[in-house]
Image (cartoon, grey):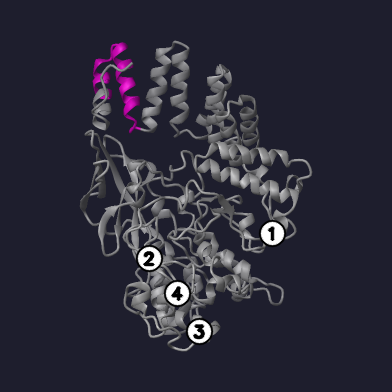
Amino acid sequence: MIPPSPISGVRPRAGALAAAVVAALTSGAAEPGLGSDAMLRGPMTRCAQCHPAIVESYLRHAMARSLGPIGTVEPGVVVNPTSKARYEIAVDGSGPTLTATFAHGGVRRQRLLGRIGAGRFDTSWAAGEMDAAGAVTGRLFFAPVETIAGHGLSLSPFELYPRSAGVDLPLTPACLTCHTTDRTGAAAPFPPNLLGSDAFSRLSPLTCAACHGEPSKHADIMSAVAVAPPGEIGLARLGSLPPGVQRDVCARCHLQGDARFDLVGGSPRLGPPLAGQVPVLVPRSPLEDFRFVGQLERLALSACFRGSPGMTCTTCHRPHSGVAAQGLASFEQACLRCHRVGPRHTSLTVREVTGGEARSAAGCVDCHVRRSQPFDLPHVRSADHFVRRRIPPPRDDVPYRPFADREGELALFDDGRLAHALATPGGRRWRAGVLAMGLVTLGRFEEAARQFDLWAAGAAGAASTARPSAPDLAFPLTDLTTQPSFHTMRGMVAMARGKAAAALAAYAEAIALDPRDADALLSRARLRFDTGDLAGALADTQAVIEAWPEAEQPWDLRAEMAARAGRPDLVRAALEASARRWPSNARTWLELARLRADGGDAAGAQHALARARALDPRLDARPR
């Protein structure tokens, strides 16, 4: 008899392969070549008992190492040639640190706490801010340097942008949603990057559940722990789903666009189109180059996709194997299943088409699937999924940019399943609302205002206003009016247009949906303060303080309120509270130095001034 697994209680199948995979997952020390992150234990172990070959293959996939503990980091120095910021990674007794020295002489230090990415192309590092004493705060940031496979330490892509955030680019749950299966661990705090210094010991990389859903019910049914109706296995058989629904599983992470909005809290339903639950905006006019994770967006441009309604990602890809493991011959065969051509259907050579040597005998993928540098990830080559009869020559020198077309016209990505709903009055209104949100994220407020006007004008007779928040097959568009962020953006645009009453009304709608929504509360507090409603501003900041006690933003606003009231004692108290929560704001320390000096606290003033000058030596000791 095979004893039950100590983890799951389900009897594993006999066999050396199952035993090896289960033992590797159970111990956390995998067989050679298998993923070894301890967070893969648990659900993956249970799956491996019945599907050892699939799990073994998947553990070699980069998705199985989508994030994890810090591991080995290469020490080194990288300098931004534009800003002259110097970034040094060193390793001490507590692990790797990042020291940023800016052109003005200021210094910031962060502890590297985790990795994002499997390292096949690159590895991004998650960093936690350190205070003056070396303690790590719970706020996480993208490090401005990363490791490029075959290239070593390099500036992170965002650091190449003229308006780079440097060491202040927050790492939020929205950034991690495609790298972790753990939705609970990625619940949104405020500030959004207050994930905790232990986040990467809690968050799991992508497991079977990322594509198949929670496997516990399936395991219980298949092991007879639970009883189910005939034919029910507790999981959707992805291969038997309609093509569009199959594509939606991949599109959760492989369709980014220039703006993307999760309207269902990270748990889209299978069945209703994903585009109605997580709408994505892409350039209306396709561009020549592509983004690293824009696979479905680009594939949808291809003639073979448009002419094959049943085409899915698995038409070419084996989802449990990485591209390298699957092998180029497999992709060639996928082409030949639909395109019955001879081995030499053209007089052109691969080199004449691509500038490189052929990687396969047939040359289908070489000549029709361009391998080039994505515009958002320098120093790597990836596959452009826009399959064409003649591809443009590959490039390895595409200048970095964060958006495909920041100023261009946007379109809602749809594979046709939303067409009927979007043609209705409610659908047209919904589209205008989504476009408005996207334009706000791009800073295009005037255009966003016009779309919000269209949204408001379509209120009469718009079916979406009466629909429930959960999408259905009859009207598969998640109601925007149930989203606090939608109303907060409406308020921001109204403020930009000088319409205070409309902005207050929009913020009130957001707060009614979520009384803890810090963005709406702080935006309303700012507006109330600017319009002289100090009592209202005080109430809103108090609500944020009570809901999010680690946030410094309400204290910063309270310092302004106290200054207007002529209460330097309260200004100092508010700034002290702000500095405790976020110790890396040089101007907060500088103002504290002045206030402490005015209050007779010479030692405290010197300490605050030293902190301010360490962060930014340019600051004057006695500012206005």
Work out which quarter of the rendered image holds the C terminus and state it: top left
The vertical placement of 299 against 487, above or below, is below
Is 550 colored magenta in this rendering? Answer: no
Q: Give the Cα separation between the discs numbered 4 and 1.
A: 30 Å
Q: Give the Cα separation between the discs numbered 2 and 3.
A: 23 Å
Of labels 2 and 3, earlier in sequence is: 3
In the rendered view, does 234 fall on the left or right side of 57? right
Residue at label 3? 336
Q: What amino acid is labelled 3 in the image? A: Leu
Q: Is residue 10 visible?
A: no
Q: Give the Cα separation between the discs numbered 4 and 2.
A: 12 Å
Q: Magenta segment, which residues?
A: 583-608
Task: Please identify, in this view, whether the residue under mark 4 or under mark 1 is nearer the observer.
Answer: 4
Of labels 1 and 3, earlier in sequence is: 3
Q: Give the Cα separation between the discs numbered 4 and 3.
A: 13 Å
Is 591 colored magenta in this rendering? Answer: yes
Residue located 25% across and 19% down the image = 621
In the rendered view, does 152 fall on the left or right side of 548? left
Q: What amino acid is labelled 2 in the image? A: Ser
Element under disc 4: helix
Q: Nearer the viewer, residue 307 or 530?
A: 307
